[in-house]
Image (cartoon, rainbow, N blue to C red):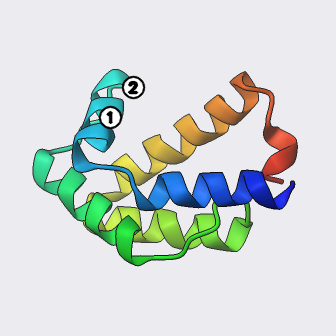
Amino acid sequence: MNMLTKKMIAYKLKHLSAEEIKQKADEYQIALSHQQANAIASHLKQSNYDPTKPADRTKMLKKLAELTDSKTAQACQSLFKQLIKEYNVEHLFY
């Protein structure tokens, strides 16, 4: 993956708002409260995850499970896998 794409992904993660997170959760029928969306957005702003790296994705999912619950984290992981297949970008993440 080129560096520009990685930087764009990292930028978007750091700048996700709680409202965007909640909207996407609702769109994909993932149970998420406004308080949880705020906690996720706050955490992402403070962290430096690279979702293209498996180790960072694992850390993100563990933290997501702490901020929400394991069921929500698993639903997000499944959605992530589904979307990267749907958008044909699997090669960027594995």
Q: Is residue 84 left or right of residue 35?
A: right
Task: State the SS at label 1.
Answer: helix
Residue shown at 72% from the left, 66% from the top? 54
Task: State the SS at label 2.
Answer: loop
Residue at numbered disc 1:
25
Picture quadrant of residue 51: bottom right
Evaluate if marks 1 and 2 touch, with contact meaning CB atoms under 8 Å apart: yes
Residue at numbered disc 2:
28
Q: Is residue 65 above or below residue 84?
A: below
Q: Is residue 19 left or right of residue 87?
A: left
Residue 47 placement (x, y as % from top left): 45, 76
Residue 3 placement (x, y as % from top left): 81, 61
Q: Nearer the viewer, residue 12 or 27?
A: 12
Label 1 is placed on what type of residue?
Ala
Label 2 is placed on what type of residue?
Tyr
Q: CA distance from mark 1 to mark 2?
A: 5 Å
Residue shown at 62% from the left, 71% from the top? 56
Residue 58 placement (x, y as % from top left): 59, 68
